[in-house]
Amino acid sequence: MMTAYAQPPFRTNTARSPLLIPTTILALTLSACTTRSVMNFNRFDGRADAGAAAQFQQDDAICKGEVAKAQAMAAPIYMGRSLADAMEAGMIEGQRNNALRQIMVGCMAQRGYAMTMMTVPN
């Protein structure tokens, strides 16, 4: 008498499975101790009254509009199908983000603000 056993619905890839757990642990560890940098703008003249705060809101909105306009005119970044294409797209995106940051800093500098980077925890 033969006994038939049902086959499992999926087959595991044993070549990739040993790397899955260490990679997941590394990713969780790195994400737990990351910080992010934020831009902080201060007036060159040091004013901090209500009029200066209102002017900052207006200048900030204008400069964010300039950044949005530059971002809208940029060509799309295609990820591709391979890991190399995705890595290249990531590098291009990082360069684009740096360029957009420089547009913001330059715009605010024209309006009388100095930028300092502040590091804050995630």
Image (cartoon, rainbow, N blue to C red):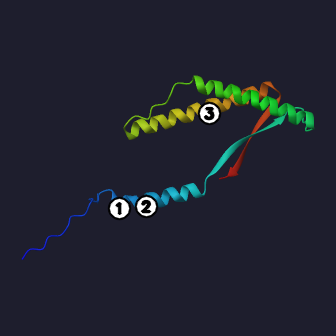
Q: Amino acid at mark 1?
A: Pro
Of the image marks 3 and 1, the number of the one nearer the N terminus: 1
Query: Quick check: marks 2 and 1 in contact, CB under 8 Å?
Result: yes
Point out residue 8 in the picture as x, y percentages from the top left corner: 25, 64
Dot 2 lies on which element?
A: helix
Q: Is residue 112 left or right of residue 23?
A: right
How far across and down, in percent of the image, does residue 55 sit?
86, 31
Label at residue 18:
1
Compute the Cα span from label 3 to label 2: 32 Å
Disc 2 marks a residue whose amino acid type is: Pro
For marks 3 and 2, the one nearer the N-term is 2
Q: Neighbour class for label 3 at 10 Å: few (<14), some, many (≥20)?
A: few
Would you identify the image quadrant in which residue 1 lies?
bottom left
Q: Quadrant of residue 80?
A: top left
Instruction: Name the secondary structure under disc 1.
Output: helix
Q: Crowding near pointer 2: few (<14 within 10 Å), some, many (20+)? A: few
How busy is the neighbourhood of tag 1: few (under 14 within 10 Å), some, or many (20 plus)?
Answer: few
For badge 3, the amino acid type reads Asn
Return the residue at label 3: 98
